[in-house]
Image (cartoon, rainbow, N blue to C red):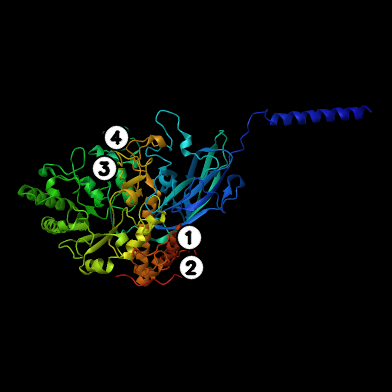
């Protein structure tokens, strides 16, 4: 009986302990308990648009499941390739999200391990801009993904760093039940040994309640092809506005003084001549990395505060150290070990004195302009004179025809070897070529329409044709650079250059942060993406992001506190680079496997021209799907690799059947 009472007593004690423990776990009434921080994650192509409302795809996983599929892609040597990682928190917001790519390694058949160092990887948070007035031809309002905020700032600190204060960890965060994409970009150095490189991307985050979210390691595989795209067989010319760059470069809205540009030497130009050169280095390198040449020879002039040619024509002294770096021929004076090697050199005529605007106004103008062009040609030198072109006149009217022809002859006489470039619509010129013009800029929307009556004449005369696009009433039909358009519209540019047979690709600006209303001196592209509008009533033309492809690199409101930083890039600029790299793939296919094979791949992106119809723009259909570009590029990579003796594992299986290409225009 005593033993029975003892057992009952022990049972009561045990029950009381269980109840007490349970009560300890149950919060008092009115106290909310946040579920553990967790999140879905999945992957997207660089040219996919991932919105805050985008829900997890079929391949998405919860971080707590630990069942992780990886990211795999291929790349040639000297190629950049990126993927998006979408993160969608479940029960609570995340902050302090961090992506840490590891080294990637490949062990060859001889047992030698090769490394693709993690320093070749960079990470970005995709930032949304708010479309309130859709571009003409589009209707969607709301947030659009575009800007790429660097997770590591120019001074080596993480996004959200604030000088002298606690970092703002929400700058690297994501709200609950809201999708936030991140962009991971890899560069494959030219010296990389071909092979299949593997590693991982380590992802960490903290819940809003301060508890760590599950850390994950995303497997990463890059197949490096045995060929290179270091060659740049396509000429490019993209303008930039230095005044707007200066305005956004610091809190004082101007160029920083000497020694005021923070950051390690590896992230900016060494200070050596003037502070403008110091800060412009980041812009120049950004453009070089994206395979586009500035539409001006930026380092050419010592001219005080505005980079325009000096008023005193006897003071035209080029800074040779910077000029040779710009041309890729001298010692690397900008970024350690880097020569920018731009493919074209536009003489800096815009913003120039009156003698460049009109050399024929009077004898003094003629004399000064002649000396200007002679001096410029001498500074460029015979080794690079073939890259140079004069472009002082844009889209002239019929009344300017004689002026253009005389100006072209004047440049040829005073700067032999420098080509004369003009953008021109054939209609006011009555479809008659202009004398002495070497390069004709043709608008892409009307290229196919005017091919037989105009472009053929140019090509038959042995002249160059470059294509360009801008805001038009046809921008819903033709690929351009607008934020509203599919991201593939920028990648398609490289394919259309090849299809058209053009020699170059022109664009009028990458940072047209021009005002739209009132007396404002600056349009904040983060706040107002509408970069162009004109007309009234039913003829209004709106264009978001037209001429505005990058964003200010110094912008404290988003955690970008480093003054003098390079520009913040965009998904559209990534698309442009991908398209220019695609172009080199196509050219390699053409050289190794024949033109008909190259044309067959292009047929997968650009369709056949329909019969001409009144009131319908004569323009071929083009592919909008990001996966299609990636698939065809992989097919080309495998086909090119097969022509090399170096063994190369196929990335996406054998090339698939391609629809036969329509007959070429030329």
Report, in whole angstroms, how far the alpha carbon at label 1 lies from the one at label 4.
57 Å
The quadrant of the image that shows the N terminus is: top right
**Secondary structure of the residue carrying numbered label 1:** loop
User: Label 2: which residue?
Assistant: 654
User: Label 3: which residue?
Assistant: 242
Comparing 303 with 102, the one in front is 303
Residue closest to the far left = 363
Q: Which mark is residue 253?
A: 4
**Secondary structure of the residue carrying numbered label 4:** loop
User: Label 1: which residue?
Assistant: 110
Residue closest to the far right = 1
Viewer-nearest of discs 2 and 4? 4
Instruction: Classify mark 1: residues with Cα within 10 Å, few (<14), some (14-19) or many (20+).
Output: few
Viewer-nearest of discs 2 and 3? 3
Instruction: Classify mark 3: residues with Cα within 10 Å, few (<14), some (14-19) or many (20+).
Output: some
Viewer-nearest of discs 1 and 2? 2
Residue 617 image position (x, y, % from top left): 34, 63
Q: Is residue 502 visible?
A: yes
Report, in whole angstroms, how far the alpha carbon at label 3 lies from the one at label 4.
12 Å
User: Upstream in the sequence, badge 1 or badge 3?
Assistant: 1
């Amino acid at each position: 009986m005593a033993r029975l009472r003892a057992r009952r007593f022990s049972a009561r004690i045990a029950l009381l302990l269980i109840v007490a423990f349970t009560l300890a776990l149950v919060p008092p009434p009115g106290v909310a308990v946040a579920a553990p921080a967790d999140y879905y994650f999945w992957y997207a192509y660089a040219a996919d648009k991932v919105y805050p409302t985008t829900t997890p795809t079929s391949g998405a996983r919860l971080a707590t499941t630990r069942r992780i599929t990886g990211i795999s892609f291929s790349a040639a040597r000297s190629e950049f390739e990126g993927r998006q990682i979408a993160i969608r928190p479940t029960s609570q917001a995340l902050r302090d999200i961090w992506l840490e790519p590891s080294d990637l390694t490949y062990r060859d058949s001889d047992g030698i391990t090769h490394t693709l160092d993690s320093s070749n990887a960079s990470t970005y948070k995709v930032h949304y801009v708010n479309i309130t007035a859709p571009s003409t031809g589009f209707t969607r309002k709301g947030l659009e993904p575009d800007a790429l905020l660097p997770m590591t700032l120019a001074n080596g600190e993480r996004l959200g760093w604030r000088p002298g204060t606690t970092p703002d960890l929400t700058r690297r965060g994501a709200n609950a039940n809201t999708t936030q994409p991140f962009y991971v970009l890899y560069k494959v150095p030219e010296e990389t040994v071909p092979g299949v490189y593997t590693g991982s991307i380590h992802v960490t985050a903290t819940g809003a309640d301060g508890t760590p979210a599950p850390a994950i390691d995303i497997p990463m595989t890059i197949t490096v092809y045995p060929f290179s795209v270091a060659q740049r067989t396509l000429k490019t010319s993209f303008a930039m506005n230095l005044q707007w760059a200066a305005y956004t470069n610091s809190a004082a809205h101007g160029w920083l003084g000497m020694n005021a540009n923070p950051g390690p030497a590896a992230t900016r130009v060494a200070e050596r001549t003037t502070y403008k050169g110091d800060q412009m280095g980041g812009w120049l390198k950004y453009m070089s990395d994206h395979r586009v040449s500035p539409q001006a020879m930026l380092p050419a002039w010592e001219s005080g505060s505005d980079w325009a040619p000096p008023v005193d024509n006897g003071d035209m002294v080029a800074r040779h150290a910077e000029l040779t770096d710009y041309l890729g021929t001298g010692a690397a004076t900008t970024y350690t070990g880097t020569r920018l090697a731009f493919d074209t050199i536009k003489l800096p005529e815009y913003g120039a004195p009156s003698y460049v605007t009109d050399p024929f106004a009077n004898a003094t103008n003629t004399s000064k302009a002649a000396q200007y062009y002679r001096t410029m040609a001498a500074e460029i030198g015979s080794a690079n004179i073939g890259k140079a072109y004069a472009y002082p006149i844009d889209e002239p009217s019929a009344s300017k025809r004689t002026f253009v022809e005389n100006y072209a002859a004047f440049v040829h006489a005073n700067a032999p070897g420098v080509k004369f470039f003009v953008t021109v619509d054939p209609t006011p010129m009555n479809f008659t070529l202009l004398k002495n013009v070497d390069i004709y800029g043709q608008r892409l929307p009307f290229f196919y329409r005017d091919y037989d009556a105009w472009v053929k004449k140019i090509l038959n005369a042995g002249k160059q044709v470059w294509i360009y696009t801008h805001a038009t009433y046809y921008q819903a039909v033709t690929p351009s650079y607008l934020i509203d358009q599919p991201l593939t519209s920028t990648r398609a540019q490289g394919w259309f250059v090849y299809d058209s047979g053009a020699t170059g690709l022109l664009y009028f600006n990458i940072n047209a942060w021009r005002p739209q209303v009132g007396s404002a001196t600056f349009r904040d592209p983060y706040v107002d993406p509408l970069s162009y509008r004109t007309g009234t009533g039913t003829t209004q033309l709106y264009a978001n992001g037209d001429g505005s492809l990058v964003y200010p690199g110094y912008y404290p409101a988003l955690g970008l506190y480093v003054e003098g930083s390079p520009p913040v890039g965009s998904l559209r600029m990534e698309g442009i680079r991908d398209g220019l790299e695609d172009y080199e793939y196509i050219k390699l296919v053409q050289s190794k496997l024949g033109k008909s094979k190259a044309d067959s791949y292009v047929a997968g992106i650009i369709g056949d021209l329909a019969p001409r119809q009144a009131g319908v723009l004569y323009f071929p259909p083009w592919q909008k799907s990001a996966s299609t570009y990636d698939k065809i590029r992989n097919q080309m990579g495998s086909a090119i690799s097969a022509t090399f003796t170096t063994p190369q594992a196929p990335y996406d299986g054998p090339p698939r059947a391609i629809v036969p290409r329509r007959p070429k225009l030329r």
